[in-house]
Amino acid sequence: MNLNTAGLAPKSNRRWLTAAAELFSSMRFAISLLTLLSIASIIGTVLKQNEPMTNYVNQFGPFWFEVFDKLSLYAVYSAWWFLLILAFLVLSTSLCITRNAPKMIKDMRSWRENVREQSLRNFHHRVEWVASQPRTAMAQNLAAQIQANGYKVKVIEKGEASLIAAKQGAANKWGYIFAHSAIVIICIGGLLDSDLPIRLQQWAYGKTPFVGNGIIAQIPEQHRLGLGNPTFRGNTLIPEGASSNTAIIPRQNGVLIQELPFTLKLNKFIIEYYSTGMPKLFASEVVVTDHASGKQFPAVIKVNQPLIYKGLAVYQSSFEDGGSKLKLDAYAMKGGKAAPFSLAGEVGGSTPLKNANGDELTIEWSGFRPFNVENMAQAGTDARAVNLEKPLNKQLMEGLNRQLGSAAKSDSTKDLKNVGPSVQYKLRDKTGQAREYHNYMLPVMADGANVFLTGMRESPSEPFRYLRIPADENNSVEEWMRIRSAIMNPELREEAARRYAQRAFAATSQNEALRAQLQQSALKGLSIFAGNENEAGFVAVSRFLEKLPPAEQENAADIFIKILNGSLWDLWQAARERDGLKALNPDEKNTRFLQTSINAVADAFFYGAPVYLQLKEFEEVKASVLQVTRSPGKNIVYFGCLLLVLGIFAMFYIRERRLWIWVKSDGENSSHALMALSTQRKTLDFEKEFEALKAQLSGAAQPDSNVAAHEQVKK
């Protein structure tokens, strides 16, 4: 049977109705819709869905954000055009099944017994032979042999001849019916689980998303969905010891509050870790209270082990901070002040802060993590500030080499370790501009040195850039802060320049002029390195050297760096003496610490924060994020997937074969047989089957001489 890819053509005087019916029921229309759905699904997979709109603005910029927003690409699977394509696909595929399924079922039942002898001679796979048996006996014998090969057989008398009609693999047609029905069933299940019911409630009952902040219990009724909502997918965040009886459904311009028929109380949130520090278990110990009956029972919700109750599924989605209490030391990053002052904060809250100029700032505590698993084998490449000692082109080539090349020969190794707690916060000024910071509580080993990592980024779309502050013998930042504040102190700079010059030249009348000149050079170098609001550190040094004649720059740079390093050592010792500490020996350990500190002071110019916050104490409060869903179409989709598997299996692995044998008398005790075999897909297995049937059915009988001559001519 040949399937017609054209659509229905109802008889009507209205040409547009006939054209529309033909289009909607045609296979080309269904394939086009499937292609569009595939493209939309690819977009929905590549582009993160239902993210906060600010994330998309930062990622794509204002222009493309508006373009993508008009196309509803931020919520593809709930976009009106996606649901419309889905509905038309259901309609088109249903019409295709309606048109072709009856024909297929009729063809499966049919024996195709109206064939003629001459039509069988036109088949490619045919054979004729003569046997010394009467026609009736030969027909019965052949029918039995064919039936023994798994065929269904029917013998039809055609006057002076007998026709044996046989078929096998007719269930192949069910593959088409199952596969196309599966598309319809899966699409219907998808429509039932879409947000179409929520849209209908918004349109019919005036439900609107809630915008802003507020207590959930005080949110007005027009922003709430009742218990009868047939389908939804929302999240609820529950801190330890707290409870929730609602779920938050994110919408493009706000949120809707979904009422739940029960209350979930989180007793404990459990995280278990592997020896490397990687998490291996997330679980929530909850108590469920039924609103209707008052029944209470405990439950444990794990990843891939949801709680199913009253037609709702509660999944372990993720976890957040539930408002951990933080205590920090704040160090000034501008001016000559080194002593810290104490700060307290709560994750999710904010703390006011004034900088050195008296401007009011706000610290917004956005996150706290008690564990951070990092790849310490790449600590020198992933978590670092700009290395000003290495040429920029060399840094660029090293970065490209890490990203390119054969994956099979990657030289990157993994050394996963837990580097301890970290705090994340935003520092917002009075104009609303904010920078985000990420500070680790404990020092980590990077490039052979113990350093505190503090990251900064100006927008959420950027990665953090980390400043390395060297840890002293007490695993604190106090020594580095002492060096930084000393560099910013003009009086200490003068004292350091004097000490350096005195150390370089003995106190004699002959060396007085040289010592004074060296003192002025050292003071100038320290002042240039201390910088101003526009530039400081090695950037300021390079700008100064660029003003010299090109021929003198290399020698001048060597002398300048030697004087700067020497005077910085004396500056450090002067600062320690001021604080009542003993001087240090200029050994390798102290020299390396000073060099690392100088690099950090230079990079601190790009840090962009008036204070550095170091976490000292914390009281962790965990919160579990649970996803609550009602999916009436889930079982329908599962059933559709089962039909799809059966349909594909039937279409690919069940081969339909039709066999006919025309038997007629060839004398009193002999008969002539003409066999023809057909299939929809000609394969090597089919060729082998034909040869086997030909040998089996013809037996020792000689093939007809006319047929043999004809086949010889073809060869």
Image (cartoon, helix red, strand yellow):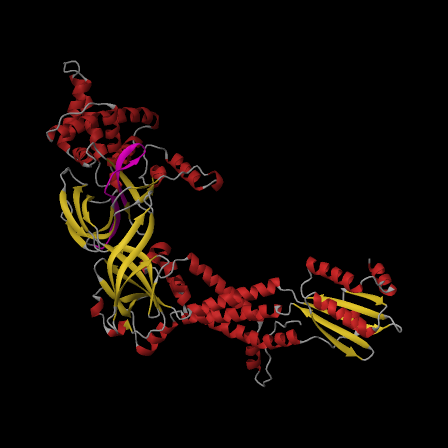
- Observer-nearest residue: 262 or 481? 262
In the rendered image, is residue 7 in sight?
no
Q: Is residue 15 left or right of residue 676?
A: left
Residue 363 x %, y %: 19, 51
* Residue at screen point 32% across, 54% down: 282
Q: Magenta span: helix, strand or loop, mainly?
A: strand
In the rendered image, is residue 537 in sight?
yes
Q: Is residue 238 left or right of residue 696?
A: left
* Residue at screen point 32% across, 56% down: 318
Image height of 347 relative to 401, above or below? below
Residue 241 x %, y %: 21, 59
Extreme residue toward the right, this view: 667
Q: Is residue 275 left or right of residue 216?
A: right
Verify whether residue 440 appears in magenta.
Answer: yes
Residue 525 x %, y %: 22, 29
Image quadrant assignment for residue 706 = bottom right
Q: Is residue 366 left or right of residue 141?
A: left
- Observer-nearest residue: 150 or 643? 150
Verify whether residue 625 appears in magenta.
Answer: no
Give the extent of the magenta segment: 431-455
Image height of 671 relative to 299, above or below? below
Image height of 5 relative to 331, above or below? below
- Observer-nearest residue: 220 or 283? 283
- Observer-nearest residue: 343 or 184? 184
Residue 208 x %, y %: 29, 72
Image quadrant holding the N terminus, namely: bottom right
Image quadrant holding the C terminus, namely: bottom right
Q: How many numbered circles are shown? A: 0
